[in-house]
Image: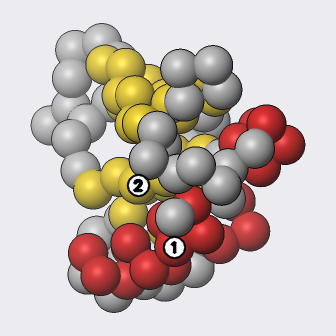
Amino acid sequence: RGFNRPVRLMLSYNSASNVGPLAASQLQVMYIRPDQKVEALPSMVNYYDRWVGTDLRHFSEYGIGWPNLTRTVGAVGGLLGGLLGGLF
């Protein structure tokens, strides 16, 4: 069951001091599917406030990453290592 209307999710990358405007413009919210595959969602990037956002229809596992990293990941360690490792 999902939401009656979309809910906005905004994820901060404020601690990632090495992400410049070009790299940030390519960030997307990633949905971690039940089969552990990663799916890039349509996203908006606010470089000034350093967040990436998308509208959700349901709660699940999400992370921030670049679209070329959409692959199968393990549990949370795989998410952090595979998707967010380039940020820190």
| Residue 66 against residue 26 in the figure, above or below | below
The part of the image, by quadrant, that contains residue 43 is top right
Q: Residues within 10 Å of mark 1 (few under 14, many from 20)?
A: few
**First-in-chain label (2 vs 1):** 2
Q: Taking the image as drawn, is residue 4 in sight? A: yes
| Residue 76 against residue 56 in the figure, above or below | below
Q: Taking the image as drawn, is residue 39 in sight? A: no
Residue 75, percent from left and from top: 26, 81
Q: Which residue is mark 2?
A: 63
The amino acid type found where label 2 is placed reads Gly
Please report the residue visible at 66 percent of the width from the left and 26 percent of the height from the top: 47
Residue 88, percent from left and from top: 52, 64
Please report the residue visible at 60 percent of the width from the left and 69 percent of the height from the top: 86
Is residue 38 found left or right of 77 in the rendered image? right
Is residue 25 found left or right of 36 in the rendered image? right
- Secondary structure under tag 2 reads strand
Extreme-top residue of the structure: 5
Please report the residue visible at 44 percent of the width from the left and 80 percent of the height from the top: 81
Tell me the number on the disc at residue 85. Answer: 1
Residue 46, percent from left and from top: 61, 22
Query: What colouring method underlies this structural image?
Result: secondary structure
Is residue 35 found left or right of 52 in the rendered image? left
In this view, the residue in front, 2 or 7, is 7
The amino acid type found where label 1 is placed reads Gly
Extreme-front residue of the structure: 17
